[in-house]
Image (cartoon, rainbow, N blue to C red):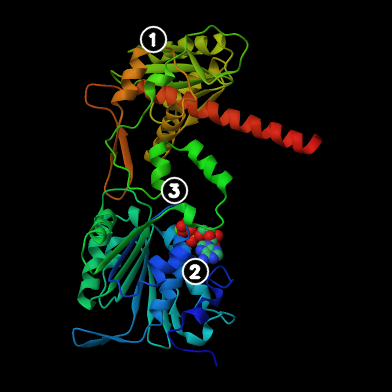
Amino acid sequence: MKSLTYDPPIVWQEINDGNPYTPWSWQEEHVHSRVDAKRLILACGRRSGKTTAIKAEIVREALKPQEEHFGMLHSPYIYVIAPNYELTMKVWEPVWNLFVGRAAPLRHLYKSHDKTRKLIELITGGRIQAKSADDPTGLQGDRVTAAFVDEAQDLNPDAWASFMPALADTDGRLVAIGIPKGKGNFRTYWQIGQEDDDRYYSASVTSLEHPYIDHEDLEEFRRDLTEAQFRQQYLAEWVEDDGQVFRNIDDCFDGDWAEPNGSQYLMGLDIGKMEDYTVAYVIDIKKMHIVARDRFNGLDYTLLGPRIAGLYKKYNCQTVHLDGSGVGEPVADILRNEGCSVTSFKFSNQSKATLVSTLAAEIEHGRVHFPKDDEILKKELELFEGVVLAGGAVRYGHPVGYHDDSVMAAGLAVMKAKKRRNTSSMARRSDYLTFG
Ligand SMILES: Nc1ncnc2c1ncn2[C@@H]1O[C@H](COP(=O)(O)OP(=O)(O)O)[C@@H](O)[C@H]1O
Ligand SMILES: [Mg+2]
């Protein structure tokens, strides 16, 4: 008969995707040796071992004996929480597989389960339930003795407000782990942990604390991110964010407009709606130089097509990338009729964030070049702002009275040119591997 006691080494035999879990030193120091912290708040880099540590601690917490709080005996009742369904399942499925099923390694501790409610009951009296913060009202509950939150930086304020009172009633435990991002509850709790409130413990852990982190991968991430993003996501720093998105702008305005010279080109196009400008940029893919632009407003779409197609043909562009929402589709059709190869990029908050952060990284590392006298683009880049919303998402935009059409068109051109270059250098590499 295996032990039923609160005995981590035994229950951790299978935690690490079926392999025994031996905590790394940071996991031991900041997670497993902090069972007395009522609020355990950890800001960690990506791939540092957050989810693994939290899974192990959930199992341990669930096997704790009953505790007395305010004169009442409570068996452990644990919420497993993440910002959305997918992230919740990342923690929940491995926990589920430890207890539920004929061959489950901790089957001897299992009492019952409810698949739809995502609930497991243990013979020791402990219960574990998964809750996705997609639906904050579902997070309300009573007698919860501990809540474990993964990717806590992205949990929305409503979600926090739904389950924190339940914890207060039982004098319960909060274990929240995530990357140091945003200005919401996660940040606030982490900050309290840095001050002297005995109930709170907070710490920061960099991705370098992963003992076998691949340093080549790390260098690649550094190349593709801005310095601020890298410090935040891997070095676990709370980067102070002054709203400015693009840095090192001036250094990139060192090129000239250039006539076609047989290089490879593509075009980024932002179509103006109402009084906005339509902006097209042509980029030299090999040099990552913006070499040509067209910019105008108030032109009828039937005239816009031939005008843009003219620039496209002059440079023999490979494709034109445009925002396919709104009037994008009809314009795309007109351009196709003019003989252009059109790829439409659907603007959403998510895709715009990718576009902006790719452009920001290329500019910051000085890997893209703009014509010296493109004052309009320079001004738009300087004024471009990112606002961190509650829950961690970023909304991008420009101050009232200014535009961001040039930024969007240049961003499309740069992002797609970068992708082209990566694909062709990968193709070269695989040629080499195959035939070299
Ligand atoms: N103590 C450990 N021993 C062995 N492997 C570990 C340990 N902790 C984490 N890992 C492994 O490291 C990788 C990253 O861990 P994960 O918990 O997913 O990190 P994060 O949630 O921070 O991105 C996973 O492959 C995981 O199995
Ligand atoms: Mg994780």
Q: Amino acid at mark 1?
A: Asp
User: In front of the other: label 1 or label 2?
Assistant: 2
Residue that label 3 marks: 234
Residue at x 21% of width, y 65% of height:
197
Residue at x 57% of width, y 8% of height:
260
Residue at x 27% of width, y 36% of height:
242
Q: Is residue 189 left or right of residue 25?
A: left
Q: Relative to 154, say whether 17 is above or below.
A: below
Whole-percent x and y of residue 253? 42, 16
Q: Amino acid at mark 3?
A: Tyr
Residue that label 2 marks: 23
Q: Relative to 352, say whether 407 is above or below.
A: above
Residue at x 44% of width, y 69% of height:
28
Q: Is mark 2 within 8 Å of ligand 1?
A: yes
Q: Amino acid at mark 2?
A: Pro
Work out whether residue 219 or residue 404 is closer to the camera in this orientation and state it. Answer: 219
How many neighbours does mark 3 have within 10 angstroms: few (below 14), some (14-19), or many (20 or more)? many
Q: Which secondary structure, mark 3?
A: loop
Residue 116 visible in image: no
Give the farthest residue toward the bottom: 1
- Mark 2 and mark 3 lie on one chain; the one further toward the N terminus is 2
Query: Which label was assigned to residue 321?
Result: none
- Mark 1 and mark 2 lie on one chain; the one further toward the N terminus is 2
Q: Which secondary structure, mark 2?
A: loop
Distance CA(mark 2)–CA(mark 3):
20 Å
How many neighbours does mark 1 have within 10 angstroms: few (below 14), some (14-19), or many (20 or more)? few
Work out whether residue 350 or residue 214 is closer to the camera in this orientation and state it. Answer: 214
Query: Which image quadrant is residue 156 in?
Result: bottom left
Query: Which image quadrant is residue 142 in?
Result: bottom left
Work out whether residue 81 or residue 4 is closer to the camera in this orientation and state it. Answer: 4
User: In front of the other: label 3 or label 1?
Assistant: 3
- Mark 3 and mark 1 lie on one chain; the one further toward the N terminus is 3
